[in-house]
Image (tube, rainbow, N blue to C red):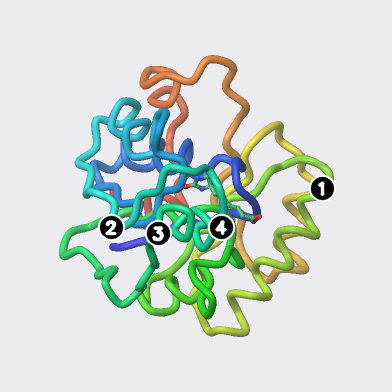
């Protein structure tokens, strides 16, 4: 299985969820485009939290900005045709949400379409998430990108889960709890749901 982890926004918990999945499945992690590489990068976080095998980024830029801009400031250009699907079972993480520009013509969602692998959408569980999640699902669906489901990150809110499943015609694959001190042990204690175990065949 190869899965693309996207989110409704930046800083919504994609790296946390990717770490959680890699820790429990042994999957390799790949973040092809990273912006803001002067402090800790997401690949290093996943390596630390999940002891996962990490594939090197294809594009990595110094400024923590949208990729099209970060590339420009580093006198570079993102050519998504150079981003190839790895052979192995892998969790691929995007940068930011779906409609983040990568260059003057393409967005993150075009990379998902090119890679032709199904997507898991990470969303917050808090108020406002229904709108963000349904918009992201619609953008995926009109491009015929297969959606495995949504993972809600944060305090459990049953109303949001039901509305997302009903209006989004999708499944909430997990409600990931709020963890105060994120560590490998803390992630290990949160077991994968049966829906995720079925997807990753563990
Ligand atoms: C700085 C963060 N680093 C990274 O790799 N992803 C983030 C970039 C998010 C871009 C969001 C653009 C937008 O939607 O406005």
Secondary element under disc 3, as helix, strand or loop, is loop
| Earlier residue among tags 4 and 3 | 3
- Location of residue 71 by image quarter: bottom left
Report if the CB atoms under discs 3 and 2 are less than 8 Å apart: no
Q: Is residue 94 left or right of residue 175?
A: left
> Which numbered mark, 2 or 4, is in the foreground of this view?
2
Circle 4 packing at 10 Å, graded few (<14), some (14-19), many (20+), is many
Distance (Cα) linking label 2 and label 1: 40 Å
The residue labelled by disc 2 is 58
- Residue 121: give its label: 4
Secondary element under disc 4, as helix, strand or loop, is strand
Distance (Cα) linking label 3 and label 2: 15 Å
Q: In which quadrant is the N terminus drawn?
A: bottom left
Q: Residue at x 24, y 30 (%)?
A: 51
> Which numbered mark, 1 or 3, is in the foreground of this view?
3
> Which numbered mark, 4 or 3, is in the foreground of this view?
3
> Which numbered mark, 4 or 1, is in the foreground of this view?
4
Residue 121, x across and y down, in percent: 56, 57
The residue labelled by disc 3 is 75
| Earlier residue among tags 2 and 1 | 2
The residue labelled by disc 1 is 159
């Amino acid at each position: 299985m190869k899965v693309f982890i996207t989110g409704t926004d930046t800083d919504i918990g994609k790296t946390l969820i990717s770490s959680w999945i890699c820790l429990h499945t042994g999957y390799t992690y790949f973040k092809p485009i990273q912006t803001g590489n002067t402090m800790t990068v997401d690949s290093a976080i996943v390596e630390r939290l999940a002891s996962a095998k990490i594939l090197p980024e294809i594009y990595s830029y110094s400024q923590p900005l949208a990729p099209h801009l970060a590339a420009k400031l580093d006198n570079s250009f993102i050519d998504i045709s150079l981003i190839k699907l790895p052979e192995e079972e892998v969790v691929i993480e995007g940068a930011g949400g779906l409609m983040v520009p990568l260059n003057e013509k393409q967005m993150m969602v075009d990379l998902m379409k090119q890679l032709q692998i199904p997507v898991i959408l990470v969303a917050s569980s808090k108020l406002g998430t229904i709108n963000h999640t349904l918009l992201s699902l619609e953008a995926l669906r009109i491009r015929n990108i297969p959606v495995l489901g949504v993972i809600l990150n944060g305090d459990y809110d049953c109303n949001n889960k039901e509305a997302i499943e009903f209006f989004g015609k999708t499944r909430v694959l997990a409600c990931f709890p709020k963890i105060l001190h994120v560590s490998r042990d803390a992630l290990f204690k949160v077991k994968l749901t049966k829906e995720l175990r079925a997807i990753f065949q563990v």
